[in-house]
Image: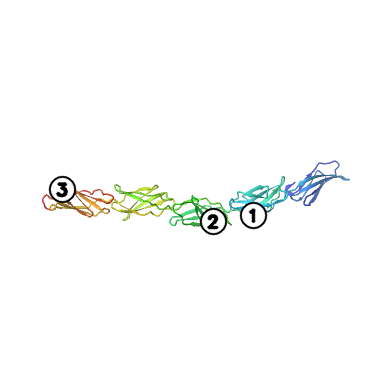
Amino acid sequence: MECANRTGVVSWELGEHIASYLVQASSPDGHQTYCSSPTTSCRLASLHCGQAYNLTLTAQDSHCNSQNAFSQLQSVPCEPTNVQASLVCLSNSAAVTWQSASGALSYQAGGITVDGFHKSYCNSNVTHCNLEHLLCGKTYNVSVLSMDHACSSKESLFTQLHTAPCPPQAVNVKVNCSAGSLMVTWPANPDAESFHVRAQTSDGSFLACDSTSTSCSISGLPCGQSYSVTVTSVRSGCESQPSTAVNVTSAPCVPQGEVANLDCVSNSAWVTWLQAKGADSYSVLGVEKGGANSSCSAANLHCNVPDLLCGATYTFHITAVNSFCRSEPGNAFQIQTAPCALTSITARTDCYSSHITVNWQLNEGSSFYVATAEGNDQSILMCNSTGTSCDLSGAKCGMQYTIIISASSDKCSSMRSPPFKMQTESNNEPSV
């Protein structure tokens, strides 16, 4: 067979004294044709497809015909008909079906994009096969041809198939920390009718939203949760493969279990707390009522807030931090720092009553004061007060005293004040 033009070529051996040869062909569908030749071959044109032709060869001379010789010729298989292609959305492949074609031993289905840049084929001995690995967002012309051992039919009439839409590219996710929401955006995709956004946690739970534009917002995020965010394109109920995942984390949970201890020597605060879900690090801030502040940061569960003012009350709070958000501040707590050392000291003595009255200014942050006077004979006088003065009893005339005052709070004592020296009069007259 000359497959391309459906022509059969019949040949034989040359006989003696033969003037010409006649080949007659008949097919099961009733088609008959013939060719004649004085040589050893002739051509049977325009054979019907898919037919097994019976051939009769007759040799002729000038007087009579020879006995007949017989053979058979299989024509080119017919083209498949009723070709249909259905999209298998999940795998972005095509299920192709057709009606059987006369003379066909096998089939080949092919899909070619309308721009001609991509092709996919499948072979089958039955009337269906799947075209795999189709490109997303493309239109394919799908056709089928029949094959036997020698020839292939022409391609069938094609049917068109539109593949699954392509997933969005360059997906961007922004976390709105205060609102507890995600804003997801992506470039426009004219091949899609809508988009489906999915934010999934490691345990398989997820939040989702749908959009017909190029953005979508997911609200109600619990604190401290990590999400893998993907976007799929949707057209006619067919969903694309997911976009490349973007990993984000919602605002960390508010730290709890805060405990603070004052270091009286360095006048700093050692603060501890419990682990907050979703936190990468923590920040501790202490603010004094006059506006002075001090802070520290840590990746673990404790840090030291340095350089606090003496005699002040600080309000502290702890904030959890990750690469996307800061939590709301934790519960506020207060620390009163060590009292400041006293400097404004005055004293007066009255020998008649044998006591020294000591005065000082009220010290912020102090709740209790102790005055100590040491005479040059190493005698000690002491008094205490919660106010701004106290009396040192038992003072001697003509004695030099060195007076110091220390202030204390419920947690710490200050360093002693600078010494204040005074001399009592040697006579019994009052002196200052």
Q: Position of residue 236 (x, y in %)?
A: 59, 57
**Dot label at residue 227:** none
Earlier residue among tags 3 and 2: 2
Q: Nearer the viewer, residue 178 or 257?
A: 257
Q: Amino acid at mark 1?
A: Gln
Q: Label 2's element?
A: strand
> Callout 2 environment at 10 Å: few (<14), some (14 to 19), or many (20+)?
many
> Callout 3 environment at 10 Å: few (<14), some (14 to 19), or many (20+)?
some
**Dot label at residue 160:** 1
Determine whether, in the image, residue 346 is placed left or right of residue 295. Answer: left
Q: Position of residue 160 (x, y in %)?
A: 64, 54
Earlier residue among tags 1 and 2: 1
Q: Position of residue 421 (x, y in %)?
A: 18, 49
Report the residue marked by disc 2: 195
Residue 320 visible: yes
Q: Label 1's element?
A: strand
- Camera-side mark, 1 or 2: 2
Q: Position of residue 316 (x, y in %)?
A: 35, 53
Residue 139 visible: no
Q: Amino acid at mark 2?
A: Phe
Determine whether, in the image, residue 277 is placed left or right of residue 1. Answer: left
Q: How is the image coloured?
A: rainbow
Q: Amino acid at mark 3?
A: Gln
Earlier residue among tags 3 and 1: 1
Report the residue marked by disc 3: 400
> CB under 8 Å between callouts 3 and 1?
no
Which quadrant of the figure has residue 359?
bottom left
Determine whether, in the image, residue 284 is placed left or right of residue 374. Answer: right
Q: Label 3's element?
A: strand
